[in-house]
Amino acid sequence: SRRDPHVHSGVQCAGCRGSPVTGERHRCLFCADLDLCGGCFSRGVHSHHPFVKKATIDGAWLPSDRPLADAPPAIPDGLLLELQSRELTTDDYEALLRLDQGAASTPLHTHLTRSLRVPDAAELARAC
């Protein structure tokens, strides 16, 4: 008998303590080993950190979109990509001020989760 791919065996929700997590599994990007079920994530449990999610045990991790409590200012994607690809100089002063002022479109955690390459199932199997 094949396991239900929507049941995340061995995963306990840090909010309601339900185990196993069934359906969407949300993982905190900052805290070690902190998972939430879809219900607790929707109710705003642990809303001060960004999360990624997956619906099935072999599914890809995707950004979990939820407004953050006290979210850091968003960063323009083009500016962030430009600054990531070269050394900073004194000519970057205006760009850094714009970042500091939060003149932006995409929060940093969203940019990072969208720009990270997601390994395929074969790569994940080799890593385990």
Image (spheres, rainbow, N blue to C red):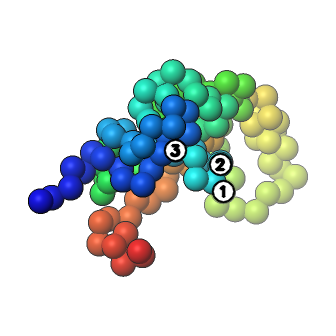
Q: Amino acid at mark 3?
A: Asp
Taking 116 as reference, is 57 left or right? left
Q: What residue is rendered at 63% in x and 41% in y?
A: 108
Q: Is residue 94 visible?
A: yes
The image quarter in which residue 10 lies:
bottom left
* Label 1 or label 3, whichever comes before in sequence order: 3
Number of other residues with Cα within 10 Å of mark 3, as a class: few under 14, some 14 to 19, many 20 or more: many
Q: Nearer the viewer, residue 27 or 87?
A: 27
Q: Which residue is mark 1?
A: 84
The image quarter in which residue 75 lies:
top right
Give me the disc on residue 31. Answer: 2
Q: What residue is rendered at 21% in x and 50% in y?
A: 4
Q: Position of residue 103 (x, y in %)?
A: 69, 28
**Which numbered disc, 2 or 1, marks the residue closer to the eye?**
2
Q: Position of residue 127 (x, y in %)?
A: 42, 75
Q: Which residue is mark 3?
A: 35
> Marks 2/1: CA distance?
25 Å
Q: Position of residue 96 (x, y in %)?
A: 79, 42
Q: What residue is rendered at 56% in x and 39% in y?
A: 14
Q: What residue is rendered at 36% in x and 50% in y?
A: 8
The image quarter in which residue 93 lies:
top right
The quadrant of the picture occupied by the N terminus is: bottom left
